[in-house]
Amino acid sequence: MRAYRVEELDGETVLASHAVEAMAPYEAARKALGAEVTLRGDADKWIRVIELTDKPPTRLRPGVFEFKVVGRRG
């Protein structure tokens, strides 16, 4: 499992932040929010998932992924 920070945003304003362990970024977003997610597109209210890792870096900066909630939160 990998560590992720999941942030809920309205525009560029962070409304909430969650620490989550998951196998993939979309799973981290789904676990943190209790809802299904899809790619952000141009949604104003969106989810930013930042991959955190203690392993040797494979890239110069952490992976950042953008999603939006689809359907209702559970």
Image: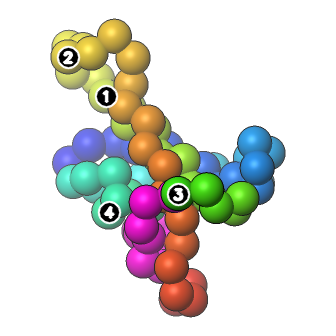
Q: In this view, does 33 lie to the left or right of 55?
A: right
- The image shows a total of numbered marks equal to 4
Q: What residue type is labelled 2?
A: Thr
Q: What residue type is labelled 4?
A: Glu
* N-term-proximal mark, 3 vs 2: 3
> What residue is disc 3 on?
41
- Badge 4 density bin: few <14, some 14–19, many ≥20, Cα 10 Å: some
Tell me how far mark 2 sits from mark 1, CA to CA.
10 Å
Residue 58: numbered disc = 2
| Number of the front mark, 3 or 2 | 3
Res 47 quadrant in image: bottom right
Q: Which amino acid does label 3 sit on?
A: Gly
Q: Is residue 39 above or below residue 64?
A: below
- Badge 3 density bin: few <14, some 14–19, many ≥20, Cα 10 Å: few
Q: Which residue: 32% across, 63% down?
A: 27
Q: In this view, does 2 lie above or below 74?
A: above
> What residue is disc 4 on?
27
User: Residue 3 appears at what percent x and percent y?
Assistant: 34, 42
> What residue is disc 1 on?
53
Q: Is residue 26 left or right of residue 44?
A: left
Residue 57 appears in the rendering: yes
Tell me how far mark 3 sits from mark 1, CA to CA.
26 Å
- Badge 2 density bin: few <14, some 14–19, many ≥20, Cα 10 Å: few
Mark 3 lies on a secondary structure that is: loop
User: Residue 18 appears at what percent x and percent y?
Assistant: 56, 53
* N-term-proximal mark, 3 vs 4: 4
> From which residue to which does the magenta span run?
30-40
Q: Which residue: 56% across, 89% down?
A: 72
